[in-house]
Amino acid sequence: KMKPEPLLQLLSNYVNEDSYIVWCGISDILGGLDTVMSDDPVMSKNFKSLAKSIVIGLYKKVGWEAKSEDGHLGVLLRGMMIGLLSTFCYDDDDVATEASRRFALFQQNHADMKSLPSDMRSSVFKIILKNGGAKEYQEVKAYFRQATDNAERKHVLGSLGHSPDPTLKKSTLKWAISGQIKLQDFFYPMGAVRSSSSEGSQIAWTFLQENFKAIKAMIGSASPSLMDAVIVSCAGGFCSDEKANEIEEFFKVNPMPRSSRKIQQTLENMRANAKFLALLKSSDLANDSFWSSL
């Protein structure tokens, strides 16, 4: 197993990489580290700064516009890159400005696939939401009613929870169980809130506890996979033994036999991530000087 320090040192050397195959690995590592470090605000801030510099390097090479020499992997790389922009670079001035320009054109004509192709929509919506407020939130949400098919509606469901405003996060969760969203899709906004930030994780978990009976009644005798999805979407974002114990206790008091395996898997992942975070905290990654040396 590679120690944390050389892993981060290795990652920092990929600022000029533009191979889709290599970036599949980089993207997975960035996503995993981001999830684990989100429970440590100082380390998370340092990591996000490094991740931003790596992704911006790719952004400068690939850009927003499709090119004639792209090929299949080039198209996939650009889609991945814009997804990474929405996670690590949404506050970059150039990224935020271009996302706003494209969103404005999309608002004028939802069929404008050049300004905002389908594979960019979720990511651009997230950038708009993260940099905006109630106005942008309502504009993105309005597309749910205006979209002509379910795949397009999912762009809204998977992004709306990324507004930084806790009140809007809570509104998103209430909307999820309002009956306005198909039962097969109602957990997507929950997952968006949970994955948006450490604060979002706590808001989603609190929501599940407070609305557990209502959610259970909504699902009724439908597939157990729906409750599994709700549990992961609302309770799957923590990296501490304390939270794992709290969640485990909740489901002892509120047993869900049909979801017991998913609950167990979620707790195991949480405790494994807690061990990994403890390892990171005991490494040089806990020191600002390490990050400034990269």
Image (tube, rainbow, N blue to C red):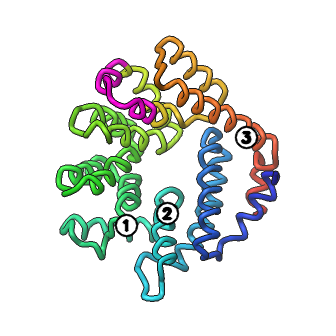
Residues at discs 1 and 3 in contact (Cβ within 8 Å): no
Please, what is the three-letter code of the amino acid marked with disc 3? Phe
Relative image position of residue 184 (x, y in whole percent): 31, 39
Left or right of 68 on screen, residue 50: right
Please, what is the three-letter code of the amino acid marked with disc 2? Leu
Q: Provide the secondary structure element on which disc 1 rests.
A: helix
Q: Which residues are magenta?
A: 213-229
**Residue 90 inside the magenta-drawn segment:** no
Looking at marks 1 and 2 on the same chain, the residue that comes earlier in the sequence is marked by 2
Instruction: Decide whether the magenta segment is chiefly helix, strand or loop.
Output: helix
Residues at discs 1 and 2 in contact (Cβ within 8 Å): yes
Looking at this view, name the residue that lies furthest to the bottom. 68
Determine which residue is flagged by label 2: 85
Left or right of 211 on screen, residue 284: right
Depicted 181 relative to depicted 86: above or below: above
Depicted 271 relative to depicted 147: above or below: above
The answer to which image quadrant residue 30 occupies is bottom right
Q: Provide the secondary structure element on which disc 2 rests.
A: helix
Q: Which mark is residue 267?
A: none
Relative image position of residue 266 (x, y in whole percent): 57, 32
- Identify the residue at image location x=28%, y=72%: 113
Q: Which mark is residue 276?
A: 3
Looking at marks 1 and 3 on the same chain, the residue that comes earlier in the sequence is marked by 1
Q: How would you rate the neighbour count of disc 3 (Cα within 10 Å): few for under 14, some for 14-19, many for 20 or more?
A: some
Q: How would you rate the neighbour count of disc 2 (Cα within 10 Å): few for under 14, some for 14-19, many for 20 or more?
A: many
Determine which residue is flagged by label 1: 99
Distance between the alpha carbons at the discs numbered 3 and 2: 25 Å
Please, what is the three-letter code of the amino acid marked with disc 1? Ala
